Each structure stands twice: as C-alpha cells, then as structure tokens.
Image (cartoon, grey):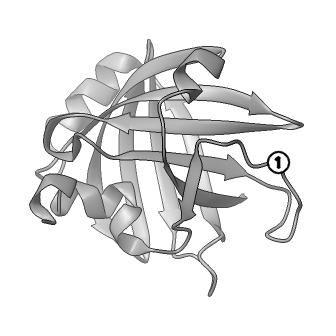
Amino acid sequence: MTETERKFLVLADTYKTESYTHKRITQGYLSSVPDRTVRVRIKGEKGYLTIKGRGNASGTTRLEWEKEIPVAEAEQLLAICEPGAIDKVRYEVKVGSHVYEVDEFFGENEGLVIAEIELADEYEDFEKPQWLGEEVTGTEKYYNAYLSRNPYNTWK
C-alpha cells in the first residue's frame, strides 16, 4: 500500500504527441492535511477515493490507499470537499520501461505542468525524456493538495 514516485517540472509540450492516452481529471479534498490527504477524483468515466499518508524524508515514498467508486458517489463527495478543486488533463507517456503521468493544469493552476513517474524504489534507474525539467520530488508546493489551497497563479 505504498507508492514511490518522483516529480518533475515539464519544459515543453512534446509529451502530448508522445502520449498514448489522456483523460480529464477533476479532484477535490475531503482532508488536505499533510499527514493524511483524502482525495475524491473523477478520471474520465471513473470515480476514485484515495487516502495518502505523509511522505518519507526524501518525499518519494508514502502510504497510498485507493478504491474505485461510482461516479455519482464521487460527484456527491466533490460537492462537500474543501474549497479549491483541481482540474487537469493527465497524459500517459511510455519512456523505456516506465510510464510518466504528465498533468497539465487548468483554472487557477493553469500554466503548471508536472510529470510523475512511479518506481519500485527511490533508487531505481529510469530514462529521462528531453521534456523533463527540474525535479520537485518532496517539494510540498507541487502537491495537488497544496495547489488546491494555494493555486499556482497566486505564487507570483
């Protein structure tokens, strides 16, 4: 029930032509405290409820529990979430033996593009495509829960 991932800023939009799928995602938080985030998400035609724990010292690994729920239930839960919904399109791009999930944000987070890669452990080697920029793993301001409360467009 743990996930190990690394996050990066994205330099160019060439990932779009390299992606094999993309889906719109709307998500909100029932709890956005760092020790336990509780997220409700509609991804394409499916709903999800996800609980994540605090990350380790490097920010790469943390507990993650996720269950698929009916979209109608996800819509009801989104209605009672904390203010600050996240709206984005997720592109999936295969690079070597891994898949990058590249999120292009909209609304108050428009202009932000983040790529994530899930790994077996935090020291696993992986290929880095040319569009991959600065690593932001463990940097709280790039977590979706933080972005829901402190949108990217207010940072400047």
Residue at 64 percent across and 82 percent down: it is 58
Percent from the top left, x then y, of residue 60?
65, 70
- Front residue of 136/144: it is 136
Asked which quadrant contains residue 152, the reply is bottom left
Q: Work out whether residue 19 can be spotted.
A: no
Q: Quadrant of the N terminus?
A: bottom right
Q: Quadrant of the C terminus?
A: bottom left
Label 1 residue SS: loop
**In the displayed structure, would residue 155 be above or below residue 138?**
above
Percent from the top left, x then y, of residue 78?
22, 36
Residue at 87 percent across and 36 percent down: it is 96
Q: Is residue 9 left or right of residue 127?
A: left
- Front residue of 66/16: it is 16
Q: Is residue 24 left or right of residue 149?
A: right
**Badge 1 is on which residue?**
127
Q: Work out whether residue 65 can be spotted.
A: yes
- Front residue of 154/52: it is 154
Percent from the top left, x then y, of residue 30?
27, 53
Residue at 62 percent across and 27 percent down: it is 92
Q: Is residue 12 left or right of residue 108?
A: right
**In the displayed structure, would residue 34 be above or below residue 20?**
below
Within 10 Å of the Cα at label 1, are there few (<14), some (14-19), or many (20+) other Cα atoms?
few
* Amino acid tagged 1: Glu
Q: Is residue 94 left or right of residue 37?
A: right
- Front residue of 28/121: it is 121
Residue at 48 percent across and 46 percent down: it is 11
Q: Residue furthest bottom?
A: 57
Percent from the top left, x then y, of residue 110?
22, 40
**In the displayed structure, would residue 65 be above or below residue 135?**
above
